[in-house]
Image (cartoon, helix red, strand yellow):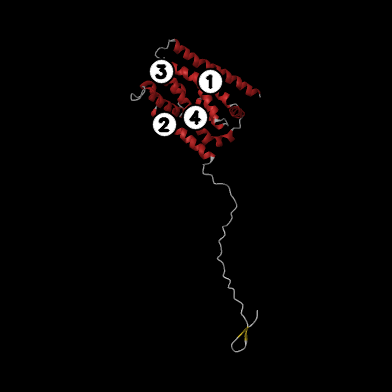
C-alpha cells in the first residue's frame, strides 16, 4: 500500500486495522450416560403373586362374613325382581366363584329363585363372568411367578395340554366335573392358553351341568317329578364319566 504524505513533507505508514477476538461463551455439554435397564413401573412377579393371594384371601373372608348361601333359605330381596334381579344375581355369582363359593350351590340357588330358564341364563352369565375375572387376575398377577415352578411331570403335562389344546381341554374340564371350577380357571391363567377360547369353552361346557342344577333347584319341591330325576341323572353321569377319564389319564401318565 503506498505511503501517505503528511503536511510537513514526511510520509506516514498506514497502520493495518486491529482485529479484536472476543471469546465466545462456552456451551455446556450434556453428559452422555450409558443406557441402563429400563425402570419398570409394574411390580415384580412375586409382589403381584402376593397381591393375588391377598385378594383371594380377602374375598374368601368376605364370603364367610356375609354368607351368600343364605339366599337358599332367606330368598332374594323383595325390592328386586325379574331380569334386574337375575342380572344382579349373575354379578354376585361371578364374584362368589372368584371367592371359591361352590358353583353347584349357586346353580341351585339360581333355579330356586328364578326358575329353570331364567335361572340357567343368570347362572351361565355368572359362570362366564367369574371365570373371566379369575383368569384375568391369575394371568396378570400370578403367571410370571408360577410358571417357573411348573417342574413336576404332571404339572408340565397339564400345562402343555392347556397351552397346545386349550379349547378342547377346557371344554372337557367343564363338561366332566372333577377339576374344581376355581382350579381350572387359575391353571388356564398360568398356562399360555388364550382368553377367547377359554371363555367360549367355559360357556359351552358349563351348559349341561348348570342347566341340570338349575332345574333341580327349580323342582326341589317335587323330588319325584321326572324333571328332577332327569336333572339328577345329568348331574351324576358326567361325574362318573369324569372319574373314569381321570383314572385313564392317570395310568397313561404313569406309563410314560
Q: Are marks 4 and 1 in contact (CB under 8 Å)?
A: no
User: In percent of the image, x 47 and y 28: which residue is there?
Assistant: 130
Mark 1 vs mark 2, CA separation in Å = 29 Å
User: In percent of the image, x 60 and y 21: which residue is there?
Assistant: 249
Mark 4 vs mark 2, CA separation in Å = 20 Å
User: In terms of secondary structure, where does tag 2 sit?
Assistant: helix
User: In terms of secondary structure, where does tag 3 sit?
Assistant: helix
Along the line of sight, the residue nearer the viewer: 1 or 82 = 1
Figure quadrant of the C terminus: top right
Query: Mark on residue 175?
Result: 1
Placement of 54 over or under 175, stated as above or below: below
- Decide which of tag 3 and tag 2 comes sooner along the chain: 2
Residue at image mark 2: 62
Mark 4 vs mark 3, CA separation in Å = 25 Å
Residue at image mark 3: 115
Q: Are marks 4 and 3 in contact (CB under 8 Å)?
A: no
Placement of 5 over or under 66, stated as above or below: below
Query: Mark on residue 132?
Result: 4
User: In terms of secondary structure, where does tag 4 sit?
Assistant: helix
Disc number lying in front (3 or 1): 3
Amino acid at each position: 500500500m503506498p505511503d501517505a504524505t503528511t503536511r510537513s513533507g514526511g510520509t506516514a505508514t498506514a497502520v493495518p486495522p486491529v482485529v479484536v477476538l472476543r471469546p465466545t461463551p462456552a456451551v455446556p455439554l450434556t453428559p452422555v450416560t450409558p443406557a441402563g435397564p429400563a425402570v419398570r413401573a409394574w411390580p415384580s412377579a412375586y409382589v403381584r403373586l402376593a397381591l393375588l393371594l391377598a385378594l383371594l384371601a380377602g374375598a374368601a373372608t368376605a364370603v364367610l362374613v356375609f354368607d351368600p348361601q343364605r339366599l337358599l333359605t332367606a330368598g332374594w330381596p323383595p325390592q328386586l325382581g325379574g331380569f334386574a334381579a337375575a342380572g344382579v344375581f349373575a354379578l354376585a355369582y361371578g364374584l362368589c366363584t372368584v371367592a371359591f363359593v361352590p358353583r353347584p350351590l349357586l346353580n341351585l340357588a339360581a333355579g330356586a329363585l328364578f326358575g329353570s330358564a331364567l335361572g340357567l341364563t343368570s347362572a351361565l352369565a355368572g359362570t362366564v363372568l367369574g371365570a373371566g375375572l379369575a383368569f384375568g387376575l391369575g394371568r396378570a398377577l400370578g403367571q410370571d411367578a408360577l410358571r417357573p415352578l411348573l417342574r413336576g411331570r404332571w404339572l408340565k403335562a397339564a400345562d402343555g395340554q392347556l397351552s397346545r389344546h386349550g379349547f378342547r381341554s377346557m371344554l372337557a374340564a367343564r363338561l366332566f366335573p372333577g377339576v374344581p371350577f376355581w382350579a381350572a380357571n387359575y391353571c388356564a391363567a398360568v398356562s399360555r392358553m388364550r382368553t377367547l377360547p377359554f371363555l367360549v369353552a367355559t360357556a359351552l361346557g358349563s351348559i349341561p351341568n348348570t342347566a341340570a342344577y338349575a332345574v333341580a333347584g327349580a323342582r326341589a319341591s317335587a323330588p319325584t317329578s321326572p324333571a328332577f330325576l332327569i336333572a339328577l341323572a345329568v348331574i351324576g353321569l358326567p361325574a362318573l364319566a369324569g372319574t373314569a377319564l381321570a383314572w385313564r389319564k392317570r395310568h397313561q401318565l404313569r406309563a410314560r
